[in-house]
Image: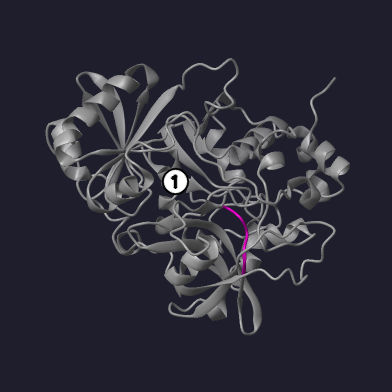
Amino acid sequence: MNALSLQDGIDKAGSPVKLLWKPGAAPWTPEVIEREYAGWRQEQAAWHKGVALLNLSHHMYDMWIEGRDSTRLLADHGANDFENFAIGQAKQYVPVTKDGNIVTDGILAREAEDRYLLSGVPAAQHWVQYHGDKGGYDVSFTTDPSSAFRPGGGDPTLFRYQIQGPLAQELVEKVCGGPLPPTKFFHSTPVSLDCRPVRALRHGMAGQAGFEFIGPWEHAEYIRETFLTAGEPLGLVQVGALAYTTPSVESGWIPSPVPGIYTDPDLREYRDHLPLYGVEGQRPLNGSYFSEDIEDYYVSPYELGYGKMISFNHDFQGRDALQRAKDTVRRTKVTLLFDAEDVREVIGEGQDPGFVLTYARHRVENATGPVGVTMQTAMIDPVGTVLSLTLIDKEFAEPGTEVWVVWGEHPGPGTPADADLDFPHVRATVQHAPFNRHARTLYRRNI
């Protein structure tokens, strides 16, 4: 018996929304690593005031793309500029459908002239491999799923440790015996730690200066212990699965938007190809924002803030749609700063709510009616309240604009989208995205 496909799941449920709508769904957190080490509050504080070690080794899905057509394949199905893509450089890869909706981004690193590594949520990898196989490109694919889905268990191919925070530079220099060569944002430099080869990628997820150290898994424990030992005098804190999910809210990255693949008749074959029990069929939708039409959840890369990454110097799937959309995008990305008193009363039921994390789509309103939708929401203890990355109508995107977040769980299909469900409202103020000033102003400069 063949495994069920995404299209099978849609057909059985009756619609994409009926398949994906799961009220009260628990938010995803990285697998394998501890939920907390020092406690989520202390771990968040570490990347704001000290230095933190974040373990990215287990939850990333890696796919190597190799062959003489590797660049052509990626350029044909991605909106990025590939003309000056240097070996050792990484980009946020932006694959889009013919309608200009994002499939889901990923981190694309060029390892050699004809070899790339695409990492992150596997929707982008599925898209690239499908078109590579179907289009007859001269490429090969090697995949390493996340630890939760690796067949037969086993270890990852690579380790990834991120060193983050105001003291990150000091720790890196201590471990490496001096400053690393000047490295541009999202470029890597090779280093050797006691003869163990490592790549240091200039990158961070919380708006502070930092590096991501990447190398063969056989050296993972040694490298980790080296940083822990050297970092002890600096107060190095390991970050667990709970706190790990929150820095993206400050740095302005919206993880795992709904792929724009569920309705186009021309993508029927693609949906037949995808497994039902994959990210496209299992990543839940929930929250107070509800629509029966899955296309209301699709997003443009412009809305996500990826406009600067889009290059029209080559032909690619979705090019015409993105050109048409460039000056007509209705929504933009902002951060909502929740009123701390409302957070205690509504979310904490009169008390400190403790850890808060949700990927639910909550409706954002003002006196005129609905004006936006939240995408990721988390308690940021050093800020003292909840922040939410949100897509909002441009006319209400000015920092300082006051709105309300409708806090609740719509039951889904069978109940009208605009039903009065007596959900409480949380006051919020529009702020910049990224919220973190360093991420917004200095993050991409050279060290």
- Which residue: 55% across, 50% down? 94
| Residue 127 spot, x, y in % from top left | 65, 39
Front residue of 373 and 342:
342
In this rendering, the answer to whether 193 lies above or below 445 is: above
| Residue 195 spot, x, y in % from top left | 22, 18
In this rendering, the answer to whether 331 lies above or below 2 is: below
Q: Main secondary structure of the magenta part?
A: loop
The single residue placed furthest to the front in the displayed view is 350
Task: Give the side of residue 381 with respect to residue 331, left or right.
Answer: left
Residue 307 showing in the rendered view: no
Which coloring applies here? one colour
In this rendering, the answer to whether 416 lies above or below 65 is: below
For label 1, count other residues whose C-alpha is less than 10 Å away and answer few (under 14), some (14-19) or many (20+). many
Residue 26 placement: quadrant: top right
- Judge whether residue 164 is colored magenta: no
- Which residue: 48% across, 33% down? 116
Residue 92 showing in the rendered view: yes
- Which residue: 33% across, 45% down? 43
Residue 405 placement: quadrant: bottom right
Front residue of 176 and 4:
4
> In the rendered image, which quarter contains the N terminus?
top right
- Which residue: 46% across, 75% down? 429
Q: Secondary structure at mark 1?
A: strand
In this rendering, the answer to whether 3 lies above or below 165 is: above
Task: Give the side of residue 151 with respect to residue 162, left or right.
Answer: right
Residue picked out by circle 1: 91
Q: Magenta stretch: give its range.
A: 359-363
| Residue 45 spot, x, y in % from top left | 29, 51
The single residue placed furthest to the bottom in the displayed view is 367
Task: Tell me the amino acid under the disc marked 1.
Answer: Lys
How many marks the image carries: the answer is: 1
| Residue 146 spot, x, y in % from top left | 53, 29
